[in-house]
Image (cartoon, rainbow, N blue to C red):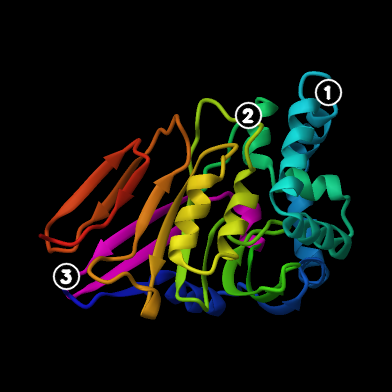
Amino acid sequence: NTEMLVISLYALLWLACLSHGFPVLDVSGTPYQVGKAVGTHFRADIQAFVADREEELSHFERCIHSDESKNAAQQLFKNIQSFDEDILQELKGIAVGARLNLSTVLIINTAPELAHVCNSTAVPDCSDLLINVGDGTVVAGHNEDNDRPFNRSYFLRAKVLRSNGIEESFTAFTYPATLPGSAYGFTERGFGFSCNAEFPVEIDVGGVPRYAFARKLLSQSSVSSIYETIEKTKSASGFAVNIFAYGESRSTGQISILSKILTRFCCSVCVFLRDCSGCFLIASCVRWASILPCQ
């Protein structure tokens, strides 16, 4: 089998973004302590981000208190806590550090779902391209297609001690006041992933909001545990996860890159290149699309 080395363009983008002014914060502690440190350090950027999105966030605030939408919105908020209490504690820390109401931070972190609940226009998110360069190397590239307020994003290099005693260690490009994992990131355990928005025609308010779902993936111990989490967790709305592994975490005999579209009603085309020059797979509206070795 060809020795595969998955080089993440995310790491290269990280270095490039540093030279263009995206800040980096090294942070450690419990989920609440990490969230509070992030909120405190980036308070000015987060508050400016909220001000830039005032019209949208005010619309959501009115919506979640309306008779038509409050039950669905409150269910989405409750789903975060029942899914992972540590994630809720991280959000509480962000709110305290940034001097925002917790409801504002919850709205920001359920915006993809609230766009459906509140009949709002979804904001275009991001694009990914996985390229086989032909020498046993795969380059995974991620582009942020968001609107201008997201230029206040930042990098987190975090060590998070979860309530179960397990320590997470990751680097993630993170939107203001948003849980890490929803854009792209990589861990010290030899894997990483990026996310892309999908725009389903229906959502499931009984599922886990997208940003909380992605945050959970950063806490996993291996690529296989990511797959397991994806399989057993019900997503409230749609998004794609593009997973890569490197070093000892790389699967023997195949490239450890896989994409899953987490929605029953997807509306995108994903393109993945196989482990041979000139071969490619186009997958449209599929549950799994993985890069496989040449036969």
Check contact, mark 1 vs mark 2: CB within 8 A.
no
* Residue that label 2 marks: 116
Q: Front-most of 218 and 55?
A: 218
Q: CA distance from mark 1 to mark 3?
A: 55 Å
Comes first in the chain, label 2 or label 3: 2
Q: Front-most of 255 and 146?
A: 255
Q: Residue furthest top?
A: 68
Q: Front-most of 61 and 254?
A: 254
Residue at (88% x, 61% y) in the render:
96
Three-letter code for the amino acid on which mark 1 is drawn: Ser
Alpha-carbon neighbours of circle 1 within 10 Å: few (<14), some, or many (≥20)?
A: few
Residue at (64% x, 33% y) in the render:
115
Give x and y (percent) for residue 124: 52, 43
Kindly tell me whether residue 118 is visible in this rendering: yes
* Residue that label 1 marks: 66
Three-letter code for the amino acid on which mark 3 is drawn: Gly
Residue at (80% x, 59% y) in the render:
89
Comes first in the chain, label 1 or label 3: 1
Provide the residue span drawn in magenta. Answer: 126-152
Alpha-carbon neighbours of circle 3 within 10 Å: few (<14), some, or many (≥20)?
A: few
Give x and y (percent) for residue 232: 53, 46
